[in-house]
Amino acid sequence: MISRILYYSSRPQEVQYLFQMKKEFSQFKPSDERLTTISERTTDREFCYEALKKVSRSFAVVIQQLPTELQDPVCLFYLILRGLDTVEDDMSIDQKDKEQMLITFADRMNEAPFNMEKVGDTQDYRDLMLHFDKVIRQYHELAPQYREVITDITNKMALGMNKYAHQDVVSYEDWDDYCHYVAGLVGIGLSQLFLASDLEHSPNLKEEGLSNEMGLFLQKTNIIRDFAEDLEQQRVFWPQEAWKGRVEKLEDLQQNKEKGLEVLNEMIINALSHVPACLRYMESLEDIQIFRFCAIPQLMAIATLKELYNNSDVLHKNIKIRRGRTARYFISIKTFEQTKKEFIKILQSLAKNDTSQKINQILTQVNAYENV
């Protein structure tokens, strides 16, 4: 507590950003009550936004950046995929039953509203699934072009989840493939929703490769950051190619600091390789609100990677960026030029400690692109 007070006393502007962000978030109708207690006295739409705050506080803030036209489609897109993910993450469900539930998920949501009792590994997720009919009814209210996108992505993600229920992430290629199914498809789906709204028109949004890399960058950052937590729950997402030649078992990285840092830094550099594509995608966005919706998570991801790089604490606990820095991104960064400068500044800082020179190579790509 004392160290935090000392830190913020030397950064008064970050305190201002924190208060500003808190004020903006308070306008999103927050509620501390359980979903089960509010479910009977809220509309389906209100329930969806309450549920969004419960299962992803950060996304609930970011979605406020979007134009009104896109807020409901993106909120429901997220909740439906979160519902699918909740089924996939619930280890109490028999594997064969789970596969059937995943494969039929999109068909069911296009037929009639449904609920799932006792599904989910936390109370917030169980509450979401217990009242999932409210999400589905709102989904049925969306325009056909939005429902078509959400259905397609849900189907593809379910297939990917079933694929990796029987397949390990062995190579970096597998890692890209896994991240495509759980996050790249989200990027592709969001681009399709943006285009369907007629608020975006760039051909770059039709290029699935760029949208996919936006998702991969975020997902890889999360996987790297969550190493200790995932290992504790016996979930393995770090590709074997990164660590198998260095240690016998993945958990050995926690005891061998040198090898642990080698693997950690190698994976961070792999994640950073997506930066040039992410910048190209973001520069293509025409609508400033859509741009901010996309840029804020990307800024948080590269700032997180900076905190994780060469930091052995990652092997033992979850590391997060300062809340003040997060608030600064939410409040002060509003243009592509600002975003690009922040990316370059972080890459330059990381390159100073990279003996492999690979981060410098990424920086060279970004600078070359910058001058085009």
Image (cartoon, rainbow, N blue to C red):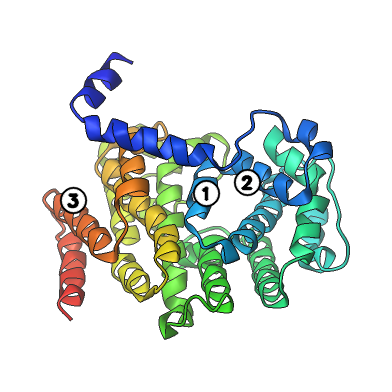
Say whether disc 3 or disc 1 marks the residue closer to the N-terminus: 1
Q: Quadrant of residue 72?
A: bottom right
Q: Position of residue 126 (x, y in %)?
A: 75, 39
Say which mark, if any, is on residue 250. Answer: none
Mark 3 surroundings within 10 Å by alpha-carbon count, few (fewer than 14), some (14 through 19), many (20 or more): some
The amino acid beneath tag 1 is Phe
Q: In this view, does 158 lie above or below 210?
A: above
Using the rendered image of the protein, determine whether residue 254 is visible from the camera's viewpoint: no
Residue in front for this viewpoint, 191 or 140: 140
Say which mark, if any, is on residue 59. Answer: 1
Identify the residue under disc 3.
Answer: 350
Residue in front for this viewpoint, 217 or 11: 11
Dot 3: element? helix
Q: Is residue 360 above or below residue 19?
A: below
CA separation, marks 2 and 1? Answer: 8 Å
62 horizontally vs 327: left or right = right
**Viewer-nearest of discs 3 and 1:** 1
Mark 2 surroundings within 10 Å by alpha-carbon count, few (fewer than 14), some (14 through 19), many (20 or more): many
Q: Position of residue 261 (x, y in %)?
A: 28, 43
